[in-house]
Image: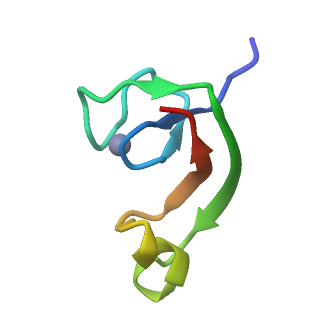
Amino acid sequence: MKEVLRACKKCKLLTVERNCPIHGEEKTTEEWSGFVLISEPTESVIAQKASIRMPGMYAIKVRM
Ligand SMILES: [Zn+2]
């Protein structure tokens, strides 16, 4: 079975779960494109712009 990556609509974190592991209630969506890998959120300009605090893969665009 192929695992489809989904993105949280709130924080854009990519996950295979249907709900965001950070936001719990927040649904994830398959409607996203592009991604960045953030390994050190405190040192990344992209992470600071997007207020990302957890390392991980994040979608660049998420359809709301
Ligand atoms: Zn989230």
5 lies left or right of 41: right
Q: Position of residue 57 (x, y in %)?
A: 58, 54
Above or below residue 48? Residue 35 is: above
Residue, x 55% and y 28% (percent of image)?
Answer: 16
Ligand 1 position by quadrant: top left
Foreground pick, 16 / 50: 50
Who is closer to the viewer here, 46 or 19?
A: 46
Residue situated furthest top in the rendering: 1
In x, y percent, where is residue 54?
A: 38, 63
State the quadrant of the N terminus: top right
Q: Is residue 41 left or right of residue 5?
A: left
**For residue 36, side relative to residue 14 (left or right):** right
Name the residue nearer the viewer: 54 or 10.
10
- In this rendering, the answer to whether 41 lies above or below 13 is below
**Residue depicted at 40% across the width and 83% down the height:** 42
Where is residue 63? Give x, y as percent: 56, 34
Coloring basis for residues: rainbow
The residue sitting at 29% across, 44% down in the picture is: 22
**Residue 46 position in % (x across, y down):** 54, 75
Q: How many numbered marks does the figure carry?
A: 0
Residue drawn at point x = 34 percent, y = 68 percent: 53
Q: Quadrant of residue 20?
A: top left
Q: Is residue 55 above or below residue 44?
A: above
Outermost residue toward the front in this view = 64
